[in-house]
Amino acid sequence: MVIQGKNLESAARELLTQRGVAITDIAELVMFLQKPYNDKISLETCLIHVDNVLKKREVHNAIITGVQLDILAEEKALMEPLQTILADDEGLYGIDEILAFSIVNLYGSIGFTNYGYIDKVKPGILEKLNNHEGPQIHTFLDDIVGAIAAAAASRLAHDNPSYSDITK
Ligand code: MG
């Protein structure tokens, strides 16, 4: 049985909300990435691009898979050694990033530059998701959110090649 695109999209969006990530949080990350190249950019424009990225099946699949694993880790429902790896957000694990690449890939190599940068700086919501305080585990979600922002920024750059050569 093939899940209807609409149902998949609403499930993915619902999971983001449940896990404390608003669409505006992601749009703010896009602003952060694009501002140096276009100081007239508005949050509304960023929101439109995030919204379009959130229509892609690859993105829905990454969200429902990654968030499920984060939740199972919170519930201590995973087998060892994966349980400890995800609970500790172990640096050498890397599969969280690999999953996020399925999103970054959507808009070409410019997405990788954006993703690498935002993953290093961790502004806004990414800092919150990464603080490792409290019972919540966001080992997968932080990379997914960074990847959605990177993809949206790349989409925006492709739409406006004159002012957003962000690979430089
Ligand atoms: Mg991670």
Image: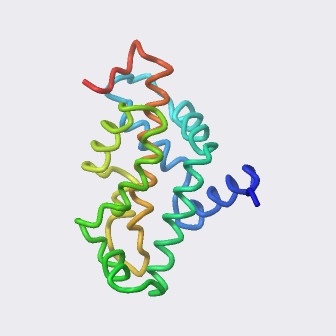
Residue 41 lies left or right of residue 86; in this view the side is right
Q: How is the image coloured?
A: rainbow
Q: Quadrant of the N terminus?
A: bottom right
Of the four image quadrants, the one with ligand 1 is bottom left
Task: Tell me which residue sits at (36%, 36%) in the image.
Answer: 33
Task: Tell me which residue sits at (33%, 50%) in the image.
Answer: 123
Residue 74 lies left or right of residue 51; in this view the side is left
Near-viewer residue (3 or 142): 3
Indicate the position of residue 96 as horizontal and vertical percent values: 38, 61
Residue 65 lies left or right of residue 92; in this view the side is right
Q: Relative to 133, is 125 above or below?
A: above
Q: Would you identify the image quadrant in which residue 49 lies?
A: top right
Question: Residue at the top extreme?
Answer: 162
Indicate the position of residue 36 as horizontal and vertical percent values: 31, 27
Task: Tell me which residue sits at (38%, 67%) in the image.
Answer: 139
The number of numbered discs placed on residues in the rendered structure image is 0
Near-viewer residue (143 or 30): 143
Indicate the position of residue 61 as horizontal and vertical percent values: 57, 56
Q: Relative to 127, is 117 above or below?
A: above
Task: Tell me which residue sits at (34%, 39%) in the image.
Answer: 112
Q: Quadrant of the C terminus?
A: top left
Q: Relative to 32, is 143 above or below?
A: below
Question: Residue at the front extreme?
Answer: 1
Indicate the position of residue 109 as horizontal and vertical percent values: 36, 32
